[in-house]
Image (tube, grey):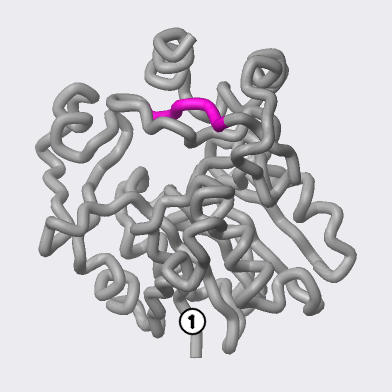
């Protein structure tokens, strides 16, 4: 079963897995029944989560019900415990919306506006190019843009646009895969083949691999950046229960 899951994850784009694979994964979830791990988003418990990863699948990663991964479960806990996201009257832009959050966020009565947007995502209500977003300046209190910037042609222009549409005092969460052993972000526009991109950047549709300068890169467009080690404040029992990555930092960009 692990090899079958790996095949679909590696060769079927995540947007199609999200759109068509939910039913199949819920069937698979029958074999994972138990109470060893829990998704804080759906509340469902399992013996363990499904493996996930295109090159080397991570064990205990994907919740078959919500389709949450380690980073999504951590972000949910962060939003609950360290922000006013679930209480304040906010206008929110969610770029490339993750399905594990989508229905939950749509039901939040405190959100004055919740807009999902992306160029390709089947879940996005607004089709747009992140380099030129069709929103006025100072439109949103919160922007989510997770695991997007490594895919776009000009990440700095995308960051400028995110800052432009944020209100003063607003904040954005900007998660991306990065290599902590890499001092500076690595990108090479001469690398164009999917195979070479996978070798250089970790995935065939990635255009760069972020290094330890990721926060500085975000700050270069005018953001104040906080790298939050929230995961380190959780107990060992919680990190195990929710199957979290203990090295995942949360990048929060503020428009002061």
Q: Is residue 84 visible?
A: yes
Residue 93 image position (x, y, % from top left)? 64, 61
Residue 182 image position (x, y, % from top left)? 13, 57
**Which residues lie in the magenta part?**
48-53
**Location of residue 10 by image quarter:** top left
Q: Residue furthest right?
A: 109
Q: Which residue is mark 1?
A: 254
Q: Is residue 197 left or right of residue 167?
A: left
> How many badges with numbers are in the image?
1
Residue at 23% x, 24% y is 194
Residue 118 image position (x, y, % from top left)? 57, 45
User: Is residue 49 part of the magenta span, yes or no?
Assistant: yes
Label 1, secondary structure: give it.
strand
Which residue occupies the foreground of this view, 243 or 208?
243
Q: Is residue 130 left or right of residue 143?
A: left
Q: Is residue 215 left or right of residue 171?
A: left
**Location of residue 250 by image quarter:** bottom left
Residue at 85% x, 70% y is 110
Few, some or many residues within 10 Å of mark 1 (<14, 14–19, 20+)? many
Residue 8 image position (x, y, % from top left)? 46, 14
Residue at 35% x, 43% y is 151
47 lies above or below 114: above
Residue at 43% x, 58% y is 175
170 lies above or below 93: below
User: Is residue 2 part of the magenta span, yes or no?
Assistant: no
Q: Is residue 128 visible?
A: no
Q: Residue furthest bottom?
A: 256
């Amino acid at each position: 079963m692990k090899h079958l899951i790996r095949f679909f994850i590696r060769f079927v784009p995540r947007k199609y897995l999200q759109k068509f694979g939910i039913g199949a994964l819920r069937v698979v979830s029958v074999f994972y029944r138990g109470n060893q791990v829990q998704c804080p988003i759906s509340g469902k418990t399992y013996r363990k989560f499904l493996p996930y990863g295109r090159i080397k699948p991570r064990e205990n990663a994907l919740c078959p019900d919500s389709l949450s991964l380690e980073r999504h479960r951590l972000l949910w806990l962060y939003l609950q415990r360290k922000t006013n996201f679930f209480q304040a009257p906010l206008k929110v832009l969610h770029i490339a919306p993750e399905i594990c959050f989508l229905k939950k966020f749509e039901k939040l009565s405190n959100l004055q506006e919740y807009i999902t947007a992306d160029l390709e995502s089947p879940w996005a209500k607004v089709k747009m190019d992140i380099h030129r977003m069709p929103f006025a300046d100072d439109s949103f209190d919160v922007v989510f843009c997770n695991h997007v910037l490594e895919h776009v042609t000009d990440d700095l222009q995308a960051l400028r646009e995110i800052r432009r549409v944020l209100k003063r005092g607003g904040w954005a969460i900007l998660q991306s895969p990065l290599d902590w052993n890499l001092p500076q972000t690595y990108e090479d526009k001469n690398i164009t083949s999917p195979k070479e991109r996978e070798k250089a950047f970790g995935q065939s549709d990635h255009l760069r691999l972020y290094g330890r300068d990721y926060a500085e890169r975000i700050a270069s467009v005018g953001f104040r950046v906080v790298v939050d080690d929230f995961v380190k404040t959780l107990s060992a029992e919680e990190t195990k229960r929710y199957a979290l990555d203990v090295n995942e930092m949360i990048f929060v960009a503020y428009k002061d």
